Amino acid sequence: MSNKVSVLVAGSWGTALASVLADNGKQVLLWSRNAEQVQEINEQHRNSRFLQDVELSPLIVATNSLQEAVEGADAIIMVVPSSGMRDVASQIRPFLNKDALLIHATKGFETGSLKRMTEVLADELPELDPSRLVVLSGPSHAEEVIRKCPTTVVVAAQDLEAAEAAQDLMINSYFRVYTNPDVAGVEVGGALKNIIALGAGLTDGLGFGDNAKAALLTRGLAEIARLGTQMGSNPLTFAGLAGIGDLIVTCTSQHSRNWRAGNKLAKGIPLDEVLQEMGMVVEGVKTTKAAYELSRRYDVTMPITDELYKVLFEGKSPQLAAQDLMGRVRTHELEEVATGAVTNVLK
Ligand SMILES: NC(=O)C1=CN([C@@H]2O[C@H](COP(=O)(O)OP(=O)(O)OC[C@H]3O[C@@H](n4cnc5c(N)ncnc54)[C@H](O)[C@@H]3O)[C@@H](O)[C@H]2O)C=CC1
Ligand SMILES: O=C(CO)COP(=O)(O)O
């Protein structure tokens, strides 16, 4: 398939996905707005800020020019953090081939509009054939993909042909790609799991133990599925790679920036200092705010998200948040299931 393939931007995940493409024999153009990073990738085949000690394939060529990266590309992988997606999408509009395959691998919602990333891309790129828009998600830490550890992901598109084209482009012996027609579900699952991962870092940091962690994952999945279903997702997607799969890896791996940020918060470090210390995107913080607003828009109960919102933005102590979650009005697991998405997930 694609001859010219580009990846925007050269963060941790963009660089790891560029490596997958290079391993598949593609010459990859990797865009960064940072001139020093471009020089380091081209001259030393390294991206030391994000993936230390990893030698990149010479098939990966970095560029500072969005025009050079996008013009004539048959496939473009967008891995901009959610906060920059609209801006970068608007900048590529003049150069984009309207039949290009546009795959994004970003996990988050747009602040304010609360839109999913494919909705933001469709807004900014009206000439692009919407059937060419694909989302890639699933349990996949960049640090492991770059070392070619066995990884599974899912690509979702309205159009099976586009999803299969993305599958064909990315799949290899260590990177197994499934397709799914549920674009909304794959995007919502990938975004919301970061909230629960922040909570898991907090829970572990407070020494609450394995029971609490299991509770957080299970009840976290219930609220992800509840909101996701109201947003038009197929509940079964949350039993798959973009749901429980990504929830497991992000809540249990110390590679997770969201887990690490939650863990630092448990030590009493203020949120702005935590984010500064991380130096990498922690999508779960903005996503907690977005999900808090979405839960009200769709009238869905999300107790874990609500408590995390209070911890992050209202100064509530995590201990009190945990106490309030445990002391919620008693309820019936199956009764709740009977009125929500989890029925279908568990069937
Ligand atoms: N790191 C990982 O293992 C995975 C990350 N993701 C998702 O991929 C997305 C990107 O994350 P990472 O690559 O990990 O982040 P990162 O923090 O490693 O790198 C982000 C890069 O984006 C650049 N950037 C930020 N805003 C920009 C803008 N407006 N214009 C141009 N460049 C901009 C930064 O300078 C940095 O180079 C996030 O949505 C994340 O949830 C998804 C799966 C795995
Ligand atoms: O989405 C991820 C793994 O699938 C990466 O999670 P973090 O952003 O928490 O590192």
Image: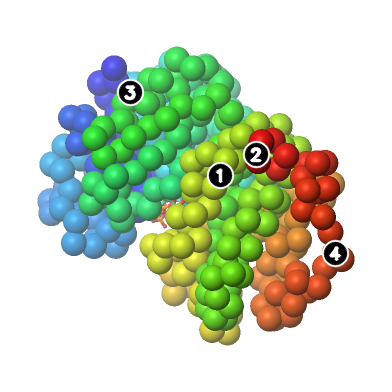
Q: Which residue is mark 1?
A: 243
Q: Which mark is residue 168?
A: 3
Please name which of the two marks, 1 or 4, marks the residue nearer to the observer.
4
Please name which of the two marks, 3 or 1, marks the residue nearer to the observer.
1
Q: CA distance from mark 4 to mark 3?
A: 48 Å
Q: Which residue is mark 2?
A: 345
Q: In the picture, which quadrant includes the N terminus?
A: top left
Residue in front for this viewpoint, 103 or 138:
138
Q: CA distance from mark 1 to mark 2?
A: 10 Å
Q: Which residue is mark 4?
A: 330
Q: Earlier in the sequence, mark 1 or mark 2?
A: 1
* Residue 261 drawn at (x, y percent): 51, 70
Please name which of the two marks, 4 or 3, marks the residue nearer to the observer.
4
**Numbered disc 4: secondary structure:** loop
* Residue 272 drawn at (x, y percent): 56, 74
Q: State the scheme by which the image is colored.
A: rainbow
Q: Earlier in the sequence, mark 3 or mark 2?
A: 3
Q: CA distance from mark 4 to mark 2?
A: 22 Å
Question: Which amino acid type is shown beneath numbered disc 3?
Answer: Asp
* Residue 264 drawn at (x, y percent): 51, 77
**Numbered disc 2: secondary structure:** helix
**Numbered disc 3: secondary structure:** helix
Q: Is residue 110 above or below residue 309?
A: above
Q: CA distance from mark 3 to mark 2?
A: 28 Å
* Residue 11 drawn at (x, y percent): 36, 52
